[in-house]
Image: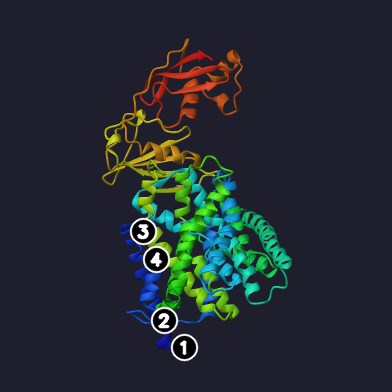
Amino acid sequence: MFNGVDINYIYFIGGILLTISILVSRLSSAIGTPLLLIFLALGMLNGEDGIFIKIVYNDYASAFFISNLMLALIILDGGLRTNVHTLRAAAKESALLATIGVVVTAGITGGIAYLLLDLSLVEALLIGAIVGSTDAAAVFALLGGSGVNLKEKISTTLQIESASNDPMAIVLTTMLLSFVSGEASDVLSELSFFALQFALGTIGGLIFGFFARLIIAACNISQGLYALLTIGIGLTGFATTAALGGSGFLAIFIIGVLVGNQKIRQLNYILPVGEGITWLSQITLFLLLGLLVTPSRMVEYWHYGVVVALVLTFIARPAAVFLCLKPFFRRYCNRELIFLSWVGLRGSVPIVLAIYPVMAGLPKAQMYFNVAFIVVLFSLLVQGASLVPVAKWLRITAPSSAAPLSKSQVGVLMADDYELYSYEVKLPSLEGVMLREIRFPKRTQIAALYRDGHMLKTHGDTTLHQGDIVAVIGHENDEPLLNAIFAQTRRPKPPTIQKGDTLLPADLPMTELRKRFGLELTSFEETLNLAEFMDYHIGGFPQVGDALNLINIRLTAAQIVGDKVSLVSLSRL
């Protein structure tokens, strides 16, 4: 098909675009522009109407194939990174926004577009369905780059909604497309199709997801192959479910959730490789869509796109948020609901869905594609640029937390392994603070401290200085507490001495305490003395005032010698 020069030219152009895309992505947070817009702009600048390479690309068939593949990989990675505990925290409201919210958004957008534009009702509703899903990845990229953190319930709701509303928009678009093309027989059959898509998508996702869990946990293969194995099973489930008439995108999302919520060592190999593949998918998808659009053709449909964008942003999305959340969830105030309405950014999914009418050969196919593109550009330029000021104005930000510089599993246990977290001491509040003055979470241990490129041996009297790197071993549940420790703006308060009724020597065997107070001990705890027992449960460096409650008694560290508890006070509860 291509001679050697043509192929090398294609490789050269592809490499240049990929390199430039990655390098200019650093501009996203610096200038407050969503990363998606950077990639789209690069594609457009090098497209048919561009000012650089002028690549003529109008093959919608290949774009349809590539964009669906890239979208499936992106949704799989979203599932892998969706924590099931986080999912439960905002499951009800997120589920409403991802299902009923998409329907309400599409219905209101389509209804008003029908009244204002020269479109039939079904055509207008199809436009509403195409632009119905949100993209929170752009939201968190912008907020993260600006150092702004959202309140947990807001960020959780946005994360789960955006991860789960794409399948709903895809199914809704497919159903309405059959009406516009004349393939639909009646409303009842289409509703049955709608229900079948979700039912088979859920079943397919569960079957292939549990299969993936078993295979990945049982396989002993090269570390780099675990991510490819996950992608292979995910795409198999996606294709099989879609071939049977279900939603492949819902299936591959569920597969990702089931695989990503295992406490196994293999997950530590899957996520980093998966992140790189997902970035490549996003860059490929966004550049491709940027090349596919022809700006000169958008001029013909600019008034359609602006009307739909204004209706979607200022009427449809707010109405969907308030109707879904206000009557049922009192924990959201009006300021939070307004913010949730404003951050409904549109991303790659609407543009991908706009290719569907082109592939179906609809008479107004170019109208759907260009209107969707204009809506996405409007959303990213207007909502994306104002995201941080609106978050601060509505006061829905949370105190910043210090994320670890890096984290990785220790690699000791096959399941529920320990994590190694590395934090940089940045705040003056920790300058000169001794490690024993910091109340680290239980079960954590200081692994190392690095200063000026050298590793120091640590003990309780070791003082911290700005620029130090502290490596801490703990469990994943300890991460929020560790983040809070290294983000605190006040100097830690010195511990208070708790006086008990009885002073006990630190070498007293725990079996003796069990006899006297009826304690229940594990077989391991029976081998410990009192000092070792305190060290085991306190974690980090023990300090005077650290206390443990054991059924009917409280044990408090009364004296520390070196880094060990030397005297314990006991008081009855």
Which mark is first along the chain, 2 or 3? 2
Query: Between 124 and 350, which is closer to the camera in this rendering?
Result: 124
Quadrant for residue 397, please give it. Answer: top left
Q: Position of residue 486 (x, y in %)?
A: 36, 39
Q: Tell me which numbered mark, 4 or 1, is placed earlier along the sequence.
A: 1
Circle number at residue 37: 4
Is residue 221 visible to us here?
no
Q: Amino acid at mark 4?
A: Leu
- Residue carrying label 1: 2
Between 488 and 9, the residue placed more toward the observer is: 488
Instruction: Tell me if label 1 and label 2 are in contact, CB under 8 Å.
Output: yes
For marks 4 and 1, give the one nearer the viewer: 4
Q: Residue type at mark 2?
A: Ile
C-alpha span from label 3 to label 1: 42 Å
Q: CA distance from mark 1 to mark 2?
A: 10 Å
Picture coordinates of residue 484 (x, y %)? 40, 38
Quadrant in the rendering for residue 192: bottom right
Q: Secondary structure at mark 1?
A: loop
Gap between marks 2 and 4 measured at Cα: 23 Å
Residue 334 image position (x, y, % from top left) = 47, 44
Q: Which residue is mark 2?
A: 10
Kind of residue indicated by mark 1: Phe
- The mark lying in front, picked from 3 and 1, is 3
- Residue at image position (46%, 22%) is 547
